[in-house]
Image: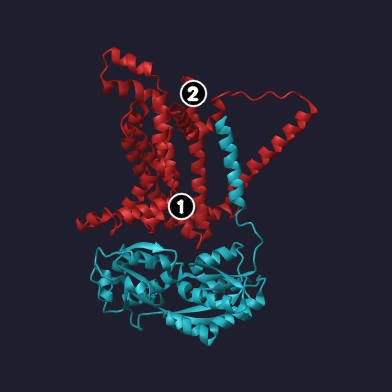
Chain colours: A red, B cyan
């Protein structure tokens, strides 16, 4: 019974990592089902084709509409708007710092989680995954109750003159909170995929634990870690709910790109469209990058 | 095998969950209302429901957000704005019934501070003190627009000096998209002071926040227009609602919340 639930859980971790989702066709059976050329199958194929086209149109149409709503020159002009520039600068900076923090703190956690067992591991793993399921607005209010000036921990911090809420630091904390599971889950899977025989071989040949980790395990898991870091960066870049509740909305300090879209929607639509287009282009680049990186992983195996 | 049944049960549960609330839609009046009217219109709506039997659904948000929603096709029977700018934009777009538009009440801006006043603010010049945490609205939400006008007026006054405006704006920690968020941040003690309306210090709020009056010479008078939408499916009932708002009873409720007569 306990063995059953264990595999079920492992399965759910694997399936829900985005790199796996993107490369789903490479897992499992992997081959398309062969459909013989018969009338009934033509109808089936036509039906499936229609379903696929509808699904594609449903996603492509809104993206296309972003580009067609305003003439491109007026959107390019919005690119010089201080609101856009400030948001772009702030978003890149905070998401970059967030990704660094998540990678530095998350890598050891993911490795320990993949290789070792310790009391309370189930609880720790569940807690780490919690922000993925938790609605961002809940994360925002929870962070405010913890680190706000009157908050549980913020109360003590403010007596030392440290205030976090409504600063750029709060933007980063909110991003770390929501995006860390995206990296840790992917990193955990990548470490689990490293053949334990490699690790053992290095150790029996006299390499220290640290040397084994940096020269054997890390290089093998690297592509997976990279795609996890890119996912965490992308999630940080898109973070909205927790940020607006915990960090507020102030141009240049806490107004990241999604917040700028929300605010500009009520004033200058071209500005909102301009930022949206930048983010769409970025999202597309992320998917392509993750796809390329994880493809190499599977080839190597 | 068990997983398969769990999956089927999940899908069935989703189907059940999604059917909740799919009953026939009752006739109701949809009123898009500036966030500062939340308390007063809540009461007026209750009064209207009791007398007409028709229910009222409110959408309380910043007037600029409501205007954007209406411009992008949101259905409303009535729109009550916290300034004329957003109402005029809808009028220019041909979206409101022009003859129904009326300014029904007025409001003033006030500084609000947490009850225990952590930053020891006593007057308007304190706003320029470095390190103070101020919250106000964005430039598009009426309460933010009014606050900027007031800061401008203060900055132009020799008593406050030429650096006053920049110093105050440097202390702003957040620009909120409706006035209720400004009040909440101050009530939570997360900000030292906020620019809100006199009408925001309601009986409930008076336990948590205090106000500092802004003298008439620097203050602005906020004018609130209401109008029936061109596309309203209930124009007669909507006009009844406007009549209730402008009646003596409606005025009494508004004045109890700190609004002044139009």
Mark number for residue B171? none
Q: In which quadrant of the rendered image does the N terminus of chain B lie?
A: top right
User: Circle 1: is it few (<14), some (14-19), or many (20+) Cα within 10 Å?
Assistant: many
Residue drawn at 57 percent across, 41 percent down: B10
- Contact (CB < 8 A) between labels 1 and 2? no
Q: Does B11 appear above or below B111?
A: above
Instruction: Identify whether B214 is placed above or below B183.
Output: below
**Which residue is farthest front?**
A1
Who's the residue at 56% across and 63% down the image?
B69
Query: In this view, which residue lies farthest toward the left?
Result: A160
Mark 1 or 2, nearer chain start: 1
**Percent x, y of residue A68:** 61, 51
**Residue A11 image point, x, y percent:** 48, 30
Q: Nearer the viewer, residue B79 or B151?
A: B79
At 24% from the left and 65% from the top, the residue drawn is B130
Whether residue B151 can be seen here: no
Location of residue A145 (image quadrant) = bottom left
Q: Which residue shows up at 50% across the image and 26% down it?
A: A295
Reading the image, the residue beneath label 1 is A258
Does residue A284 sit above or below B148 in this rendering?
above
Output the chain of dot 2.
A
Give the quarter of the image for residue B131: bottom left
Q: Which residue is mark 2?
A: A298
Q: Is residue B210 visible?
A: yes
Local SS, label 2: helix
On screen, residue A157 versus residue B93, left or right, reads left
Q: Nearer the viewer, residue A283 or A245?
A: A245
Residue B4 screen position, x and y as percent: 58, 33
């Amino acid at each position: 019974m306990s063995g059953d639930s264990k595999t079920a859980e492992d399965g759910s971790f694997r399936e829900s990592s985005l790199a796996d989702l993107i490369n789903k066709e490479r897992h499992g059976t992997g081959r398309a089902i062969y459909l013989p050329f018969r009338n009934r199958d033509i109808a089936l194929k036509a039906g499936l084709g229609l379903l696929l086209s509808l699904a594609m149109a449903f996603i492509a149409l809104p993206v296309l509409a972003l580009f067609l709503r305003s003439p491109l020159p007026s959107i390019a002009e919005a690119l010089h708007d201080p609101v856009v520039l400030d948001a772009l600068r702030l978003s890149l900076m905070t998401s970059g710092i967030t990704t660094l923090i998540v990678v530095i703190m998350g890598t050891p956690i993911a490795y320990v989680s993949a290789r070792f067992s310790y009391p309370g591991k189930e609880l720790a793993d569940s807690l780490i995954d919690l922000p993925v399921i938790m609605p961002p607005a809940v994360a925002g209010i929870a962070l405010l109750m913890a680190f706000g000036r009157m908050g549980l921990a913020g109360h003590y911090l403010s007596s030392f003159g440290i205030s976090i809420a409504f600063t750029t630091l709060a933007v980063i904390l909110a991003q770390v909170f929501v995006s860390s599971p995206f990296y840790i889950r992917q990193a955990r899977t990548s470490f689990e995929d490293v053949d334990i025989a490699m690790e053992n071989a290095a150790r029996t040949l006299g390499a220290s634990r640290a040397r084994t980790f940096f020269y054997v395990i890390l290089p093998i898991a690297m592509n997976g870690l990279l795609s996890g870091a890119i996912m965490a960066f992308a999630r940080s870049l898109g973070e909205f709910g927790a940020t607006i509740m915990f960090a507020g909305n102030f141009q240049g300090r806490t107004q990241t790109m999604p917040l700028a879209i929300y605010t500009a929607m009520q004033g200058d639509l071209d500005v909102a469209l301009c930022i949206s287009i930048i983010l769409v282009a970025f999202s597309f680049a992320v998917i392509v990058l993750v796809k390329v990186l994880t493809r190499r992983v599977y080839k190597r195996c | 095998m068990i997983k398969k049944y769990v999956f089927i049960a999940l899908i069935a549960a989703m189907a059940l969950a999604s059917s909740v609330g799919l009953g026939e839609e009752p006739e109701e009046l949809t009123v898009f209302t500036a966030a500062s009217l939340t308390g007063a219109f809540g009461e007026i709506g209750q009064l209207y429901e009791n007398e007409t039997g028709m229910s009222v659904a409110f959408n309380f948000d910043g007037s600029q957000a409501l205007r954007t929603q209406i411009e992008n096709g949101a259905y409303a029977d009535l729109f009550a704005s916290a300034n004329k700018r957003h109402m005029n934009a809808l009028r220019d777009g041909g979206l409101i019934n022009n003859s129904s538009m009326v300014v029904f009440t007025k409001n003033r801006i006030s500084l609000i501070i947490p009850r225990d006043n952590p930053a020891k603010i006593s007057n308007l010049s304190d706003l320029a003190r470095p390190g103070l945490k101020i919250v106000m609205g964005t430039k598009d939400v009426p309460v933010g627009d009014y606050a900027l006008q007031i800061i401008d007026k203060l900055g132009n006054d020799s008593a406050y000096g030429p650096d006053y405006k920049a110093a105050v704006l440097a202390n702003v920690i957040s620009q909120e998209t409706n006035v209720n968020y400004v009040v909440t941040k101050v009530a939570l003690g997360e900000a030292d002071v906020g620019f809100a309306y006199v009408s925001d210090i309601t009986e409930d709020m008076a336990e948590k926040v205090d106000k500092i009056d802004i003298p008439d010479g620097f203050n602005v008078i906020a004018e609130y227009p209401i109008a029936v939408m061109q596309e309203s499916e209930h124009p007669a009932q909507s006009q009844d609602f406007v009549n209730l708002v402008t009646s003596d009873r409606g005025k009494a409720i508004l004045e109890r919340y700190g609004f002044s007569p139009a």
